[in-house]
Image (spheres, grey):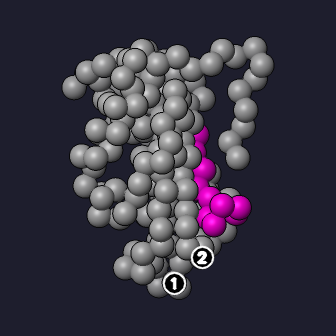
Amino acid sequence: MLRNLPENETAMTPQNPDFETMVRASFARQSLMETMGGRIERVEPGLVEISYVRDEKLLQQHGFMHAGVATSLVDSACGYAALTLAPAGWNTLTAEFKINFLRPASGSAFRAVGRVMKAGKLVSVTEGEVWQDGEKLIAKMQATNVLQPE
C-alpha cells in the first residue's frame, strides 16, 4: 500500500468542505472513465481510489490489461486526490507523470489509489499505485498536478 505520512506531517486539510461532492461530480463528467468502466470507490482528503473490472475489449496483444488503461486509472486517481484539497471552483490538470510497470496486468479486478504527497497553492505532487486482485502491485506513479480556477 502507499506509504504512511511521517508522524510530524499534519493530516491533509481540504479547503472546500464539499470536496467529496466536487470530486464525484467531476468524475461523473469524465467520459473516459465511463467508457472504461472505472468507478470511484473512496474519496478522502488527499486520497482517491478507483476500481476497474477487466474488460476484454481493452487488452493488449498478449491478453494483459493495456498499459494505457492502467495509466488512465492511476492518473485519474492522482488528479482527483489533488482535487480533494483544492478550493471550491478550482480544477486540476496533470502536468507530468512517471509510471513504472512492475508486472503484467493479468488479473480480473483492479484498483488505482492516488495520494497527495505535497500540496501547494498551485502545484501538488502525488503518488499512485495500481493493484490487481487486491494483492499484487502492478504499477507505481508519481505525478505533478496543477490547480487552476474553473
Q: Left or right of 149: which side holds 68?
A: right
Q: Main secondary structure of the magenta part?
A: strand
Extreme bottom residue here? Answer: 62
Q: Position of residue 102 (x, y in %)?
A: 67, 63
Specify the amino acid type for callout 1: Gly
Can you identify the residue that label 2 sits on? 106
Q: Earlier in the sequence, mark 1 or mark 2?
A: 1
Judging by the rendered image, the residue that carries numbered circle 1 is: 63
Report if residue 98 is visible in the image.
no
Q: Position of residue 52 (x, y in %)?
A: 47, 62
Q: Is residue 100 above or below residue 108?
A: above
Q: Are marks 1 and 2 in contact (CB under 8 Å)?
A: yes
Q: Position of residue 72 (x, y in %)?
A: 42, 55
**Residue pictured at 56% horizontal, 46% vertical:** 113
Q: Residue at x 69, y 16 (%)?
A: 9
The answer to which of 123 and 30 lies nearer the viewer is 30
The image shows residue 47 at horizontal and vertical percentages of: 54, 35
**Dot 2 amino acid type:** Ser
* Residue 85 falls in image quadrant: top left
Task: Report the residue at 28% width, 38% height from top.
Answer: 25
Cα distance in 3D space between marks 1 and 2: 7 Å
Q: Residue at x 29, y 23 (%)?
A: 90
**Which residues are drawn in magenta?**
127-136
